[in-house]
Amino acid sequence: MAKTDQTTLKLIKEVQSRKAEIEKVKKPNWQTNCSFSYIDKSTGLGGSGAINLHVCSDLSVLLNIAAFLDERAKAVKAAAKLLEVDSPPAFKWNGYTAKEWLDDLKMRVAQIQIKKKEEKLEQLEKRLNKIVSPELRAEMELEAIQAELEE
């Protein structure tokens, strides 16, 4: 196999690996209800203006939510220390811990950023397909057939 084919094959496998990682993020396991509100509904005060994390694509909004949760959690911990509470309850916002909210926020940010990564991978894949030699293409097809037969 020519050196160009070896490099091309290596790059094709890298692109496929990255595409597999992207698929994992496309099917998230959410930990919250993904309906964030700056008003804690668990206090009974109600409030509207919930932000649906499933559709929010504004990174500044997501960053502000993360900052808000982080600061609130720190403030509650500091208040417990000030009041000398021996075993303070875990900080929760609208029924979920800060960690659960932050994990979901991370997932949403990853989903937003994945779109850009997907587009880049598609462009790279097209460019790689243009330079694949007939010999390498035949070898790749044989490998794919062999893999299918082993299933």
Image: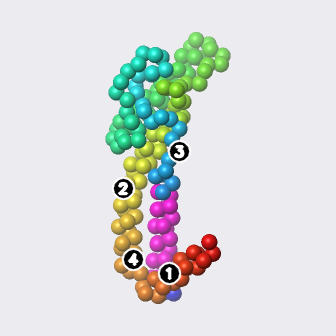
Looking at marks 2 and 1 on the same chain, the residue that comes earlier in the sequence is marked by: 2
User: Magenta residues, as a range?
Assistant: 4-22
Q: Nearer the viewer, mark 2 or mark 1?
A: 1
Q: Main secondary structure of the magenta part?
A: helix
Circles 3, 2 touching at the beta carbon (< 8 Å):
no
Q: Counting other residues with Cα less than 10 Å from the Cα at mark 1, is it few (<14), some (14-19), or many (20 or more)?
A: few
Q: Is residue 81 on the magenta stretch?
A: no
Q: Which mark is residue 24?
A: none
Image spot of residue 65 (x, y percent): 41, 32
Looking at marks 3 and 2 on the same chain, the residue that comes earlier in the sequence is marked by: 3
Left or right: 146, with 69 as reference point: right
Left or right: 72, with 58 as reference point: right
Q: Nearer the viewer, mark 3 or mark 2?
A: 3
Circles 4, 2 touching at the beta carbon (< 8 Å):
no
What residue did someone put label 2 on? 116
Q: Is residue 10 on the magenta stretch?
A: yes
**Depicted 148 relative to depicted 47: above or below:** below
Distance between mark 3 and mark 2 Cα atoms: 21 Å
Measuring 41% from the left and 54% from the top, which residue is drawn there? 114
* Amino acid carrying mark 4 in the image: Asn
What residue did someone put label 3 on? 29
Instruction: Identify the coloring.
Output: rainbow
Distance between mark 2 and mark 1 Cα atoms: 29 Å
Q: Nearer the viewer, mark 4 or mark 1?
A: 1
What residue did someone put label 4 on? 129
